Image (spheres, rainbow, N blue to C red):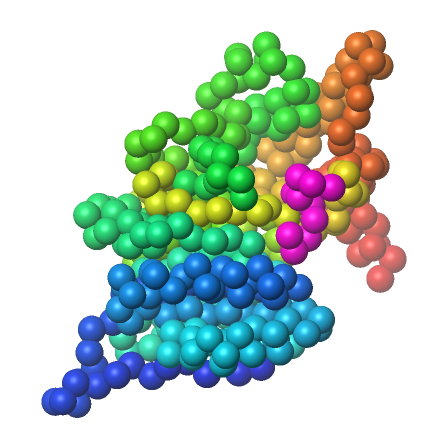
Amino acid sequence: MNCEATSVLLPEPSLSEEGQPQSPIPLLVAIVNYRTAELTINCLRSLLPEVQTLPGMQVVVVDNASNDGSVEKIAQAIQTEGWHDWVTLHSSSINGGFSYGNNTAIRPFLESQTPPLYYLLLNPDTEVRPGALKTLVDFMDQHPTVGIAGSGVEEPDGTRWPITFRFPSIWSELDGGLRLGLVSKLLSKWVIAQTMTEEAQQVDWLPGASMMIRRQVFDSIGLMDEDYFLYYEETDFCLQAKRAGWPCWYVPQSRIMHISGQSTGVTAKTNAPKRQPKYVFDSRRRYFLKNHGWFYAMLTDFAWVLGFLLWQLRQVVQRKPSTDPPFLLQDFIQNSVLMTTIGQLFARKHT
């Protein structure tokens, strides 16, 4: 996706007395805001101690065309709080999605004479706990073969959320639709969510709420795929990194607080389930098509639908309440690989 946006002013690399560039910026933090100005400001405020422990660290906030006054509010906070030495605000003229926003922040630094060593994707609805970023940087310094590292997450009330993820597969899609404890145990090696311990561990992928990426990973696989608007982009990025020899690690000693779903409401836990937007299904379909091919992607659709139909039967028999988003099955089938392929063929035939 090639989208135009307003230009961003980034700090030029400082020069030594001899006129040579000084050491690279140790860390660039990318924050993509969409109509969450107050949360973004709180996130920036939580970064103040990290700036002191990582001298030279820079933060770029990309506003994805919020058009709700976010730019003005964040700009005012930067000025009032005196954050201009380490925070840059970029106002995008379009909302190109999560990958687009992060790439907008990261690309100019990668192309600079002294690109940062590390890049942190940080959600605006997070607050970093003391030492969180320094812990990730130290971990990456000590483990040069690790490509991506992510923080442990806690709820606003301090409750631990020690979850990371496996890559999606046919079996995880069957389990996701069926939701039967016995089957989940049998498919435990493929269930996407996995509970972690207090030790750093290698995992398949991490959420982009707090994901640190080594510069060489971008050199190997490029920037994030902007054909994902939202969801599955970090899953895909971690898979590409793993295929290129850059593993992903969970580092619970680094901690952030995360309030999920504040920009979209899709994963928010405080509201009733909302109908899933089309981009969720588009992203899922793209992930399987891109990484596993048409036939495998179609099988994952079949596995999920089969599991979900059995789940609905259980709901009727056992009188279980439904907590699913409205029209979930209908929307899933309509956006499945088979139905979209038929739709594309029909459109071509009539053009």
Q: What residue is drawn where x is 77% and y is 13%?
A: 314
Horizontal arrangement in the rendering, residue 306 relative to residue 56 (left or right): right
Q: From the top left corner, tell me how far across and down residue 192 is, in percent.
A: 52, 30
Magenta-colored segment: predominant secondary structure:
loop
291 or 186, nearer to the observer: 186
The answer to whether residue 56 is magenta is no
Q: What residue is drawn where x is 44% and y is 47%?
A: 256
The answer to whether residue 263 is magenta is yes
Work out which quarter of the rendered image holds the N terminus and state it.
bottom right
Q: What residue is drawn where x is 42% and y is 53%?
A: 128
Q: From the top left corner, tell me how far across and down residue 7 is, in percent.
A: 53, 83
Q: From the top left corner, tell me how far across and down residue 90 is, in percent.
A: 53, 76
Labels in figure, total = 0
Residue reaching furthest to the left: 18
Q: From the top left corner, tell me how far across and down residue 248 is, in percent.
A: 36, 42
When the figure is inspected, residue 77 is found, relative to residue 342, above or below; the finding is below
* Residue 46 visible within the image: yes
* Residue 339 visible within the image: no
First to last magenta residue range: 262-271
When the figure is inspected, residue 105 is found, relative to residue 120, above or below; the finding is below
When the figure is inspected, residue 170 is found, relative to residue 274, above or below; the finding is above
Work out which quarter of the rendered image holds the C terminus and state it.
bottom right
Q: Quadrant of residue 24?
A: bottom left
